[in-house]
Image: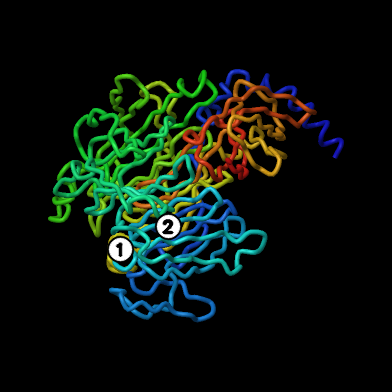
Amino acid sequence: MENRAFFLFFFSLFLPLLFSTIPFLSLYQQLPATGEWRLLQKSIGISAMHMQLIYTNQVVMFDRTDFGPSNLYFPDGRCRLDPNDTALKIDCTAHSLIYDVQSNTVRPLTVQTDTWCSSGSVLPNGTFVQTGGYNDGERVVRTFSPCVGGPLFQDCDWIEKPHYLSVRRWYATNQILQDGRLIIVGGRRQFSYEFFPRSASEPANYSLGFLKETRDVDENNLYPFLHLLPDGNLFIFANDRAVRFDYVNNRVVRKYPPIPGRDPRNYPSSGSSVLLPLHLDDIDGVDGLIAEVMVCGGAPRGAFKRAEKGTFLPALSSCGRLRVTDLEPQWEMEEMPMARVMGDMLLLPTGDVLIINGAANGTSGWELGRNPITRPVLYHPSDPVGHRFQILSPSPIARLYHSSAVVLPDGRILVGGSNPHMRYNFTGVDYPTELSIEAFSPPYLDMQYARFRPQISFTVPHQFISYGQPITVNFVLTSYMQQSGLSVTMLAPSFTTHSIAMNQRLLVLNVTGVVQASALNYQVNAIGPPTAAIAPPGYYMLFVVHAGVPSPGIWVRMQ
C-alpha cells in the first residue's frame, strides 16, 4: 500500500505537464467520448411510465392499472380486486415496483387505484407522495415511505388516501415549496391548484385563470412546467406563455413574453423544461441570483389533430432560454441538432443538461409518434452560442410515448418505459411495449477520465445541511487537482413522466476554500444554500465536480 501511494503521488506531480493544454473545466468535452449504453434488465415486467429516485438508492416505478395484466407477478400470489377497473377487475399482476440500483433487482409493489398520467414529489422526510391519475385514481394521494436499514425485500408499500384531492388531477404537475408542502397545479379541465398536506382552515383549492387562458383545441396546457424561483414565487409555463405566480396571494405578479413562434410546448405537444443551475458561487446575496428557465422541443400547433388523421408533422427543434430575474426578460432562441418531441430534459451533476428519449414526428398520445430519436444530446449552458450541443451515442431501443429517465447517484441515467398502445402490445406493431431498463453513462463516466473522478470520503456530520451554514467535504483524488476546476453541486432528484421532470434543480454551492490534507486527500469548504426558496427542504445528491467529472453522489438533507 505504501508503494502504491508513493507511485500515485509521484504520478500526480506530472499530470499538470501532461494535461496543461486541456481546460479542466470542460475536460470531457475536449476528448472523444460520446457516452455508453448498457442493458440492465430485458424485462422488469412493467413499462416504466413514471420514475422517482429516493434516498435509499432505489427507484419507484409504475405505469397504470388499466393496461390489463403486466408481466410482473406477486411472489405470494395475491391479487388486486378493483370493481372500477376498465380492463381487469381481478388482477394478479403488479403495476408498480421498486428497483434497487446496487443489486439491479426489483420488488413488486401494490398500487390499488389507477396512476395513469399522475404526478409526484418527495416530502422533506423522504416520503414519496404521488397524486392523482385516471378513473378511480384521479383524486387519490398515495404515499411510499422507503425501507431503511434493511434489504430491498422488506415490507414497505404504497398507502393510499382515497378522495383526498379536491378535484380530478389528471396530467397535473407537482412542485415542493419552501415550507415543505407540495403544490399540485392543473390537470385535464382543472384550472386550479391545491396543497398537500392542507390544513382544515384553508380552501380545498384555488382558481388559476392562467390555465384556462392557455387551453386550446388540443389542450396543450396539461402537465404545466413549474419551477420554484429564488424569490419564492412560481414560474408557470403553459402552451406558449409563462407567468410568475404568487401562490400565497393567488395572483400573477408578472407576465412574460410568449415564446417566439407561438408553438405549444406542453402536453400533448410535449416539449420539456428545466430551471438551469442556480449558481450560488457568483452572487452577492440572494438578490443577485440569476434564475434562467429553458424550454426545448415539442410539436407545432395543430400537430395532435393532424396526427390523429395520419399526418405526423416534424417536431420542433427550437429551445428558448428566459432569464426570469432580468428587469425586461426576453427569450433567447437556439436550435437543437435534431427536432424532438416527447424528450426528457435532465440536469446532470456537472451543470449540463441531457436531452434524451422521444421522436422526430408526431405528438404524445396513443400511436401518434413516429421516427424515434435514439441519440441523446448534451447541452452545455455556459458555452458560447453555437457550441452548446453535443450529440451522444445512440441507444438500440426506441423510447417514445410513456418513457422516462432519472439521474442516479453514480452519475448514470436510468432509462425505461415506452408504450404507445392502450394495452401491453408486443407483436404486430412498429413500436412494441417496452419493458426493459437501460443505463446511459454520459461522457464524464468514460474510463479515460477515471483518474479525474473524485471520491467523497466524508462530509458534514450525519449528512445534514443547514441554510447558510459552512459545510466540509473530504474527498480523494488520484490526479493533480486544479482548484479553478472544482465545484460542489447539489441535485434534487426528479419525478419524471410524460417529458416532464418535476422538482429537479441543481445548485452550484459557494466554495470558500480547498485544502490538500495529504498526497491524495483533499478538503473542500463551502456554504450551504441561503434560503428554502433556493433549496426546498429535503434530500439532495451532493457531488464534488473536478475538471468536469463528478464524484459519485452522496445523499444529504437540507433542513
Task: From the image, tell me which residue sits under label 2.
Answer: 130
Residue 74 at what x, y percent from top left? Answer: 50, 75
Q: For the residue carrying disc 2, how many other residues have a C-alpha within 10 Å: few (<14), some (14-19), or many (20+)? A: many
- What's the amino acid at mark 1? Tyr
Foreground pick, 71 / 395? 71
Task: Find numbered disc 2 in the image and state the secondary structure of the residue it sits on.
Answer: strand
Instruction: Report if residue 359 is visible in the image.
Output: no
User: In the image, is residue 52 above or below residue 424?
Assistant: above
Using the image, tell me which numbered label, if any, was put on residue 458: none
Q: Is residue 300 left or right of residue 284?
A: left
Measure how far apart labels 2 and 1 are at the Cα level: 13 Å
Give the image quarter of residue 336.
top left
Task: Find numbered disc 1 in the image and state the secondary structure of the residue it sits on.
Answer: loop
Using the image, tell me which numbered label, if any, was put on residue 134: 1
User: In the image, is residue 548 above or below residue 542?
Assistant: above
Give the image quarter of residue 308.
bottom left
Quadrant position of the N terminus in the picture: top right
Residue 79 at what x, y percent from top left? Answer: 44, 79
Picture residue at 61% right of the left edge, 64% below the top: 152
Picture residue at 55% right of the left edge, 37% below the top: 490
Instruction: Report if residue 394 is visible in the image.
Output: yes
- What's the amino acid at mark 2? Gln
